[in-house]
Image: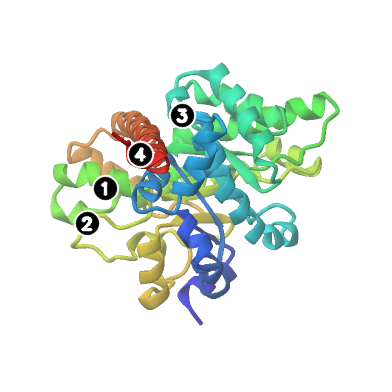
Amino acid sequence: MKATRQLHDLGQSLWLDNITRTLLDDGTLARYISEDSITGLTSNPSIFDKAIGSGGAYDAGIHAKSLAGLHGEKLFIELALEDLRRAADLFASVFRHTGGVDGWVSMEVSPLLAADTAGSIAAARQIHAAGKRDNLFVKIPGTPEGVPAIEESIFLGIPINVTLLFSCAQYQATAAAYMRGLERRIEAGLDTHVHSVGSLFISRWDVAANKQLPEELHNLLGIAVARQTYRAYREMLASERWQKLAAAGAQPQRLLWASTGTKDPNASDTLYVTALAAPNTINTIPEKTLHAFADHGHVDGVMPRDGGDAEAVLAKIGKAGVDVEALAHKLQQDGADAFVKSWQQLLQRIADKASALAAKAKGPVMR
């Protein structure tokens, strides 16, 4: 049995951390679903920037939409949603079979809104309406300004993928926002069938911390934070507050492991997939890591519910000079800034392509 199937059977969803038109057109995504137990996917501005810049798969769409008067952010959102609707349809049977627990795709609000609560809510409403798929998550970052936007969006019935979480505290703040949104729906006489996931980024911890740590502590911080957060997740599910919501029909905000590709060339290329095996969670896995795990990965049991050695490892790392709380804040801010940069590059790339395609369509100027 493939290791990917073993993860699926222990209750962890594997979602592809990528989307391109080529993956859809040539049947690769369908093959990942049938052969590698992929049951969802995620996207972000960096993924789309790379996809649109890597070839001509999007040229016809960009040209047609620019001729129709679309440009900038509106053009991109419609272009991206075309891909995501197709992917959502491939996962529709999983979505139905699991009652909406699995089978999702995700579309991010503009990263320029990371510090804009009202703007994030408005953008989430727009994407949700335009997406026209029940299994489309809208991604909102778990920044301080994003937390109230998450609560309000859940209250409005918009499924939310909370992105850019780095610490247990950041996760707990957004889990509380999810519960508040559901509680407000109950008070308003609305149903609790609004799904959410909380995406905790893992490998970026080790990229940032390894250079400050002795070799024996390399690549331990991200996993320790994950274990600490998994314990908090299990405690939340056991809480009286959550049990009341569950009795009203609510589904848990599932914990999602993001940034799970190995960045250290000296570490195993399946390090984070093996370490993060845990029931009732999701691993968004880059294509390269998916291939590696399907080929030679293995499952070594599941993550301990009580966090295992997380606190001891975090204490050692703290003594070695890494301020984990300060680093969590920096990683979230750096992540938001990186997505802004990708967003700006993406919109410029689309504008440049639209201009070049328009010029090509007109043909050479006659003199």
Give how far apart the Cα atoms at labels 3 and 2 are.
36 Å
- Find residue 315 and report its horizontal and vertical position in percent: 28, 42
| Residue 234 visible in the current orientation | no
Most foreground residue, 117 or 185: 117
- Name which residue type carries label 3: Gly
Give how far apart the Cα atoms at labels 1 and 3 are.
35 Å
- Name which residue type carries label 1: Asp
The mark found on residue 316 in the picture is none
Q: Which residue is mark 2?
A: 264
> Mark 3 vs mark 2: which is more N-terminal?
3
Q: Which residue is mark 1?
A: 206
Q: Which residue is mark 3?
A: 72
Give how far apart the Cα atoms at labels 1 and 2 are.
8 Å
Q: Residue drawn 64% across and 56% down? A: 102
> Mark 4 vs mark 1: which is more N-terminal?
1
> Given contact means CB atoms under 8 Å apart, are the residues at marks 1 and 2 in contact?
yes
> Mark 2 vs mark 4: which is more N-terminal?
2
